[in-house]
Amino acid sequence: MICVMPTTLPPVRLEPLRTACSDCNLRELCLPVGLNPVDMEKLDGLMSQRKVVPRGESLFRATEPFHALYAVRTGFFKTCLTSEDGRVQVTGFQMAGELLGLDGIASGHHSVDAEALEDSSVCVLPYHDLEHLARDFGALQTQLHRIMSREIVRDHGVMMLLGSMRAEERVAAFLLNLTQRLRARGYSATELVLRMTREEIGSYLGLKLETVSRTFSKFQDEGILEVKQRQITVLDLDALQRLVSSAAC
């Protein structure tokens, strides 16, 4: 007897699994920070879905209706805008423990695309339910405001990058930001595997691809970095910090 196996399987997008914030090792980086056990249990009730987003696919696209916030559980995302003439501008990179979808709160529609840079998963937080829950206990509402404020501060930081820093200073600030976020998650602050391409880094920093590549090579020649394609070892963290500090003077 010959068994014929299907050549493809339908992609799985939603897992009907209970994702408990109280059991998540990212809880101190995400919404649950500062919540007591009773409030945590209420928030757990919203976490009924986990969405899987394969590498290269979108979590949501610009102009799509806004329904939920997404807490990145595993993986890495980029957000970007596409102009009318087809040019793509990267607006941010999001990793585990961070929220996606805040752009849609004001207008009810997303203003950016969110694309997975590697196989990723997110916890789905229906915004209507989250908003209702936040009204019932202040700690969650405070944390939502804190996260929104953090996004505003990050946007201001990007504006400073694009407005006043030289190419070397922009790349140094970008690498320092990554090391700080990775350290907060318990990862090495000196061993990085870049999930994004040099071109995507350039789009985010307002630099040409050639400039980004040249800057990485310069940092390697100066003993600041060891570069092996997307694997980066920071050899001199203080040198990166000095570059960023000099730009702020």
Image: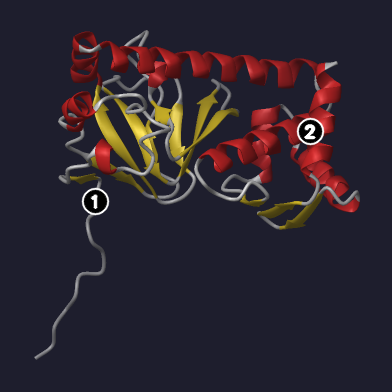
Residue at image coords 44%, 15%: 146
Whole-number angstrom distance, CA of label 2 to CA of label 1: 43 Å
Label 2, on which residue? Answer: 241
Query: Which amino acid, mark 1?
Result: Val
Measured from the top left, where is residue 19 in percent x and y?
A: 22, 42
Query: Which amino acid, mark 2?
Result: Gln
Label 1, on which residue? Answer: 12
Residue at image coords 64%, 33%: 177
Measured from the top left, where is residue 217 in percent x and y?
A: 84, 49
**Element type at mark 1:** loop
Residue extending farthest to the right is: 222
**Relative to 174, is 59 on the left or the right?**
left
Q: Is the N terminus in the top left, top right, bottom left or bottom right quadrant? A: bottom left
Query: Is 108 drawn above or below residue 22 in the view shown?
Result: above
Residue closer to the observer: 102 or 225: 225
Residue at image coords 27%, 43%: 23
Measured from the top left, where is residue 72 in percent x and y?
A: 39, 38
Which disc number belongs to residue 242? Answer: none
**Element type at mark 2:** helix
Query: Is 155 drawn above or below residue 55 in the view shown?
Result: above
Q: Are marks 2 and 1 in contact (CB under 8 Å)?
A: no
**Relative to 76, is 217 on the left or the right?**
right
